[in-house]
Image (cartoon, rainbow, N blue to C red):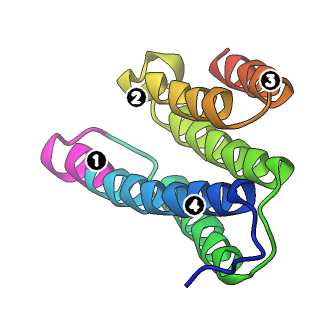
Amino acid sequence: MTDLSQTSTDSTSALNLRRLFILRNIAISFEVVVIALAYWVLTIPLPLIPLSVIIAVHGLINGFTLLRIKRPKSVTSWEFFAQLVMDSMVLAAMLYFTGGYTNPFVSLFLLPLVTASTILPQGFAWAMAALTTSCYT
C-alpha cells in the first residue's frame, strides 16, 4: 500500500530505486554465470579471488539497497546518483580485472549513463558522463 502523503515524485523515485534493485540482481546473477563460463568452460584465465570480492561487494550494495527500499523516506536525486556511481565503480573494477577497454562488456558503461540522463536532473547526467568516460579511459 502506498502512503497518500507521498507525492508522485517521491513514489516515482522509490519505484526507480526498486527497479534498479531488480536490475542489479539480474546483473549480479549474470556476473557469476559469465565468469564461471569463461573460467571453467572457455578456460580463460581469470583472477577469481578479486572478481569474487567485487561480486560480493556488489551483493552487499544491493543488500543495503533492499534495506533502503523498505524505509519510508523518499529517495533523493543524490541518493539515486550515488547508487549509479556504485554500479559504475563495480563495473570498472570488473573490467579492470577482465581485459579493460578491450572487454566486449565495456559498453555496459552506457547503462548507468542512460539511466542518469533519463531519470536525474541534467547536472547529474553530466557528472555520470564524466565518471563513465574516466572509468573507460
Query: Is residue 133 on the magenta stretch?
Result: no
> What x and y, as percent, mark residue 36?
26, 55
Mark before the other along the chain sequence, 4 or 2 = 4
- The secondary structure type at the circle numbered 3 is helix
Residue assigned mark 4: 15
Chain part drawn in magenta: 34-44
Q: Which mark is residue 122?
A: 3
Q: Amino acid at mark 3?
A: Gln
Quarter of the image with the C terminus in it: top right
> What x and y, as percent, mark residue 3?
68, 81
Q: Nearer the viewer, residue 86 or 73?
A: 73
Residue 68 lies left or right of residue 97; in this view the side is right
- The secondary structure type at the circle numbered 1 is helix
Q: Nearer the viewer, residue 102 or 48?
A: 102
Q: What residue is rendered at 56% in x and 40% in y?
A: 91
Mark before the other along the chain sequence, 1 or 4 = 4
Residue assigned mark 1: 34
Q: Amino acid at mark 4?
A: Leu
Q: Amino acid at mark 2?
A: Phe
- The CA distance from mark 4 to mark 2 is 27 Å
Residue 126 lies left or right of residue 22; in this view the side is right
Of badges 3 and 1, the one in the foreground is 3
- The CA distance from mark 2 to mark 1 is 11 Å
Q: What residue is rendered at 72% in x and 53% in y?
A: 9
- Mark 2 vs 1: CB contact within 8 A: yes
Our reading of the magenta stretch's main secondary structure is helix
Residue assigned mark 2: 105
Q: What residue is rendered at 47% in x and 30% in y?
A: 108
